[in-house]
Amino acid sequence: MSGVVLDRKQGVRRLLAPLAILGLVAAVGVLGCSKKKPAEEEPGIGSSEFKTGDGSHDSESSEPERVRELATIYFDYDSSDLRSDARTTLKSNAQAIQAHTEWKLVTVEGHCDERGSEEYNLALGERRANATKKYLSDLGVSPARMKAVSFGSSSPAVQGHDESAWRWNRRVDFRVTR
């Protein structure tokens, strides 16, 4: 009787061995496919967010990126009117956009401080982005090279709950896609 038991156990082992190997190969394959990128390839780690001053950059990317040549502009409370300092900045920004034909699309991002409802702030951010886009267009930048978006109050530049923070959050930022 013990011979029969041993033969049955050996038969089971013979059947399970290939299944175990197959399972191991499948597990290695899955783990190999989900390998994390090295730190130097991850966005924001080991590479500069800004383009270098000589016009070159670390890697080609279709992701919108900030560039030093395009400065942020700021707005007064509850306003989408361009301030005089913003107009001066936008003249420089327009020249930079026109000079950099490799920038296929400039995203004009409208932002607000935390006061007001989410719905109101999204609308105000959109008005700020559109006013900025129109002014750049009036300066000769092709509207086809620009896209206006609003983040409302969802992406503050400065954390805080007073005017010293809010003044930096009422803004339009620029990102370019190459």
Image: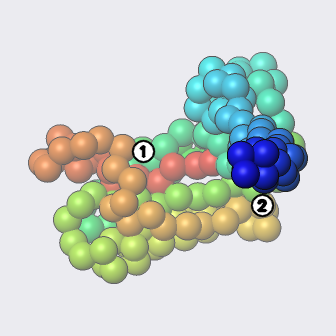
**Label 1 neighbourhood size at 10 Å, few (<14), some (14-19), many (20+)?**
few
Q: Is residue 104 left or right of residue 42?
A: right
Whether residue 15 is visible, yes or no, is yes
Residue 114: x and y, percent? 24, 60
Q: Going 51% across and 49% down the picture, which residue do you hit? A: 173
Is mark 2 in CB contact (under 8 Å) with mark 1? no
Q: Is residue 164 left or right of residue 52?
A: left
Residue 31: x and y, percent? 72, 41
The image quadrant that residue 49 belongs to is top right
SS assignment at label 2 = helix
Q: Going 30% across and 74% down the picture, which residue do you hit? A: 118
- Report the amino acid beneath label 1: Asp
Residue 72: x and y, percent? 49, 43
Question: Considering depth in this image, is 45 or 33 the residue closer to the camera?
Answer: 33
* Whole-number angstrom distance, CA of label 2 to CA of label 1: 24 Å
Q: Which residue is mark 2?
A: 145
Q: Going 61% across and 40% down the picture, which residue do you hit? A: 66
Up the image or down, 154 lies above or below 130; here it is above
Q: Is residue 154 left or right of residue 110?
A: left
Whether residue 94 is visible, yes or no, is no
Q: Which residue sits furthest left? A: 162
Q: Which residue is mark 1?
A: 85
SS assignment at label 1 = helix
> Which circle, 2 or 1, is nearer the viewer?
2
- Report the amino acid beneath label 2: Arg
